[in-house]
Image (tube, coloured by chain):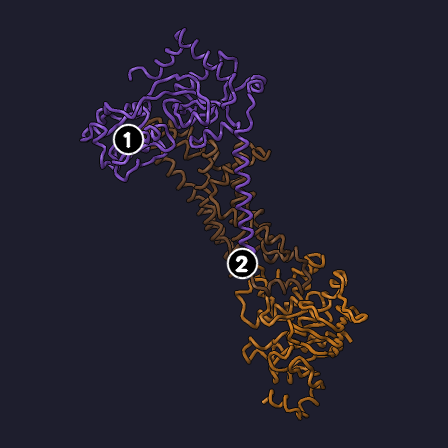
Amino acid sequence: MVLQVDGLNKSFGDKAVLKDVSFQLNTGEILAIIGPSGAGKTTILRCINGLEKSDKGTIKIDGAYLCRDHNNKITYATSEEMKFIRKRIGLVFQNYNLFPHMSVMENIIEAPINAFGIPKVEAEDKALELLNIMGLTDKRDSYPFELSGGQKQRVAIARACALNPKIMCLDEPTSALDPELREGIANIIEDLAKDNMGVLIITHDMAFAERVAHKIIFMEDGKIIKEDSKDDFFNNLKDERIKRFIT
Amino acid sequence: MFGYIYTLLPAMIDGLITTLKVFFITLILSIPLGILVSIGRLSKIKLISKTTELYIWVMRGTPLMLQIVFVFFGLPIIGITFDRFTAVLIAFILNYAAYFGEIFRGGMESIDKGQYEAAKVLGLTPYKTFIRIILPQMFKMVLPSIANEVITLVKDTSLVYIVGIGELLRAGKIASNRDVSLIPLAMVGIIYLLLTAIFTGIFNKTERRYSYYE
Amino acid sequence: MKKKNYFIMLLVILIFSIVSLTGCSNETASNKDSYDDLEEKGEIIMGLDDTFAPMGFRDDKGELVGFDVDLAKEVFERAGFEVKLQPIDWTMKETELNSGNIDVIWNGYSITEERKEKVAFTQAYLENRQIIVTLAGSSINTKTDLEGKKVAVQSESSALEAVNQEPEIVATFDGGEPVLFDTNHEAIMDLEAGRVDAVVGDEVLVRYYVKQKNPEDYKILEEDFGEEEYGIGLRKEDKKLLKLLNETLDEMREDGSYDKIYEKWFEGK
């Protein structure tokens, strides 16, 4: 088990966005969290990546606690622990958030060199390897504005992979893609899982979830309504709310 | 006529040197200070952001001329005395840092929040994020506004006359009053035009250099 | 703006006013004669407007020259002081003097009642009239002809004070007040351009300008706005220095060295 979320709660003001959310992600597993917008999917992702602080609950990443409940009080990782955690989890934003003033290569090696002190040669070798996998070797010196949406996404994945994380998170990976590119990103995600990464996908694209996920979580109104393996989930759509969402 | 212009040159060059000294020292020191001002202005600590706001308000809300007079003639009353040139530089730097600070703040605020978040999840420290991600993007964005301020600064340097420092414009006025002629003032105008042309050129070049990305 | 900001604004204004008020009281309160300090330094700082030909200005080599500069050098040499010439902005002259940045104002500085309240004057060392100059073809021949005309004067100058001594005439000017310029030169340029009809200014200056241009283009009226005298301005408390300067000027008049300098600058006037 590479990610464990237990009893997670989060409110913005007096609006509860996450209500007692618990789930797990295993090595080599692809988990898709689906549900209507406003269900709290993105907030989960932001909590796991330390972009929001949860109010209550435990998040454990590859053995390290990002936050945990202790005597009814929540404690967060120290900056030293945070560094460990950052290295083990990668995030691909919905709009990729590439650094526009840096070339593709510079985008990928920025964090390894300037956050983790990895030698430049080593970081570049790794980056070239990733670009090769993504089929972007010829784009190493291009700038983000010169790339298509699909290419940008692959650069963002390469950037997130540069530190060999154990968990890869993708926020709405198909939202900005042409339909014909969906198969390509599905293959890449499957390759990541084969490399023993745990992959967490946030999406409202049911077809894509059905295509790649091993396990599905359906959320609505800050709560997990249903959690099941993909096959059981799609074969057994009794719940009214899920049916309404799918059709 | 050309002989006359030639005799004017030494005094003009002396004045020009003072003008350029004020210009470059102000520029070199007020830009980094302006970055600090913009950080202070955006600080989450109320005391810092409010103090910075007050400073910016005073500096932008009063004429530079008044600030020079205040630093040189006013501060000695409470026991702080500077020589003429230092007083002028302090007033110029404080004034321009406030303007630059507001320009930088605008630049920083216009940078997408996603850039900070991307840097954060990649493990960059706030300092590295600022230096490597935010600052370079901000500079590109604020370059046109900075160019405007720099041109204004070239011309503002003439304000140092209020504490009796001779600069380019004053050199022109002296020669003009002495020889009862407008030619020295015309020369001064041409020199100012040349200066602004040079700085405009430098900025255009810099903007082109930054245009490698969109 | 929020209430809190109003409060901060008031606070700042308050601080500014306190600083400036204490500033004023300080200036009048420090009444120590600085002669001993000056003697120890052996140096007098003389404030002058270096755009003020022919009294004090820069020649084409950038050296400060002029009638006042020559006279001052001679006076201070006799009194045993080095003289340091400090260019100042003319509008700030009394502030420069009272804040101690300069020790004397000496640059065609006319003795007036208003100025006597702020500084101490030596004896007069040069007579001067506030003359009226027009273009040669002008219909203006007397002060009463100035009615409805635009009259230019240097701001912050004794000419302005002299003109204002005759408010009944000022009231007849176009606009009911004189047009103000930074320098006499600018005033005369505007006269040439026909935007003003007459300029009132110090005789020595105006004659210098007219001579530099073409004297035949101008007309200097017989009437004037009063005679006055140039003196050296000192801090009121510097009584010792005042006495010394007066004695030295007397001495120079007696031995003829004053006349020599006068002739160098004003011969042929």
Q: At which x and y percent is residue B64?
A: 48, 42
Residue A54 vs residue C253, the one in the foreground: C253
Q: Residues within 10 Å of mark 2 (few under 14, many from 20)?
A: few
The x, y position of residue A162, in whole percent, is 68, 65
Locate residue B189 relative to residue C213 in the image: left or right: right
The amino acid beneath tag 1 is: Val
Q: Residue at x 59, y 77 (%)?
A: A174
| Crowding at mark 1 (Cα within 10 Å: few <14, some 14-19, many 20+) | many
When asked about the image quadrant of residue B79, the answer is: top right
Q: Is residue C252 left or right of residue A195?
A: left
Q: Is residue B46 above or below residue C92?
A: below
Identify residue for label 1: C199
Q: Residue at x 54, y 78 (%)?
A: A178
Chain letter for the part of the structure drawn in brown: B
Q: Residue A19, how many percent across, how many down?
A: 70, 78
* Residue A27 appears in the rendering: no
Amino acid bearing label 2: Lys
Residue toward you, A159 or C93: C93
Residue C230 percent across, percent down from the top left: 38, 21
Q: Quadrant of residue A182?
A: bottom right
Which label is found at residue C2?
Answer: 2
Shown in orange, the chain is: A
Closest to the observer: B93 or C28?
C28
Q: Is residue A221 left or right of residue C116?
A: right
Query: Foreground mark, 1 or 2?
Result: 2
Q: Which chain is purple?
A: C
